[in-house]
Amino acid sequence: MQASLAFASLSLILFSLSEAATLTSFEAFVQKHGRTYVSGSAEYTARRALYNERLAWTEEHNRLPDRQWIAGVNKLWDWTDNEMQSLRGWDGSKMPAGSSSSSSRKISSHAAFLQQKASLPEEKMWSMSHPVRNQGDCGSCWAIATATVLEGHVEIYTGKARSFSAQQIVECTPNARHCGGDGGCQGATAELAFDWVMQHGCAEETEVPYTGADAKCSGGSPAIDMAQLFTDSSSATAASGAASFGMTGWETLPKNEYEPLARALAERGPVAVSVAADAWFNYESGIFNGCGKDAIIDHAVTAIGYGTDNGRKYWTIQNSWGADWGENGHIRLERHSEDEYCGMNSDPQKGVACQGETAPVPVCGMCGVLFDSVVPHFD
């Protein structure tokens, strides 16, 4: 494997509490972020109450002597819970499962990948050359995670940088079974996105720029029906789609298992993972351990590596809320050895399941990070 993305042991440090210290009033927050709320209006009062509630919680959290992460003021602090749900939208469900059926060189079994059993490095980090995206108020995290992973793998395996249009993936990926949402900005799955790209290829970002809104499929083939999506295995289809940039298939890694994700990161490249992100809105820096074992999976992000900081293990996750959130657009999640941090997702239809799938499912890892991981295959 020729890796042109840099392998680096990042010196990640805790950010200061400068913003939390300086933005102590809602009025300063409104000015900084250009809000247009009218002072004295019902909306202004409601937003200020949200802000002050979160500020009080943050000050209390940051006084804890044994905290592993720092909370801080960010652009999401005046959003309601319903508004923040629009930042998420992902299916980590079991449908569609497995790997691409439209690959010209199908690699459907993870067992062969693990036969090597080479020792994993203590740290591995992929340095992404494309900027962190901001999905805005469109539930396109699933599409952005797919585009980000593909950008990393193309650069690793070809030595050339190429962008992928998250907007085209949003517009064109069919979602007939309503997996992870109703499609487009209302949510879908990385599995669906990878399979659509496998069939049709994908435009570059400059060809179909991101708008953060639903629109008619543009810059490529129109969306196809689900039956065709999962049964067409012709090499001609693959050759005219993802094979043009070297992709030969994709794979869902074994669920809730530590080694497959760590090994994929160490030996292949970035991975699209599913997480419960409802507690992330006030994250600023450090190793996040704010999710309980039970987690409602509702967001798609890109795992770009793992490491250790003062003896504490972490996964490094690139989010899609802009570079001005977290650690330059990233969050470090506590990394548990093997599968020791497991619980249940008791309400999968809030973001995980396809329509009609209501049975609780097990989830493992901080914020459920081991639950569902998708990685492409390249020559």
Image (cartoon, grey):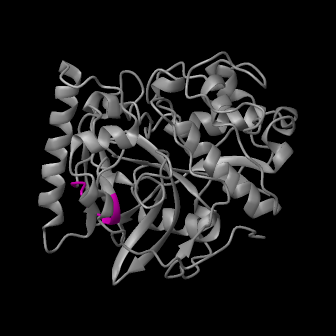
The residue shown at (39%, 40%) is 33
For the N terminus, the image quarter is: bottom right
Is 8 positioned to the left or the right of 274 in the image? Answer: right
The number of discs equals 0
User: Would residue 288 be counted in the magenta stretch?
Assistant: yes
The quarter of the displayed image where residue 45 is located:
top left
The x and y percentages for residue 212 are 55, 28
Q: Which residues are magenta?
A: 284-292
The quarter of the displayed image where residue 184 is located:
top right
Q: Is residue 103 visible?
A: yes
Residue in the foreground of this view, choosing between 89 and 24: 24
The residue shown at (73%, 21%) is 218
Is 352 positioned to the left or the right of 136 in the image? Answer: left
Is 109 positioned to the left or the right of 354 in the image? Answer: right
Is 40 positioned to the left or the right of 328 in the image? Answer: left
Residue in the foreground of this view, choosing between 86 and 104: 86
The x and y percentages for residue 182 are 47, 20
Residue in the foreground of this view, choosing between 40 and 188: 40
Q: Is residue 293 above or below residue 89?
A: below
For the C terminus, the image quarter is: bottom right
Q: Is residue 280 above or below residue 225?
A: below
The x and y percentages for residue 309 are 38, 79
Residue in the foreground of this view, choosing between 14 and 138: 14
The residue shown at (63%, 32%) is 210
Q: Is residue 358 above or below residue 272?
A: above
Q: Is residue 365 visible?
A: no
User: Would residue 21 be counted in the magenta stretch?
Assistant: no
The x and y percentages for residue 333 are 36, 62
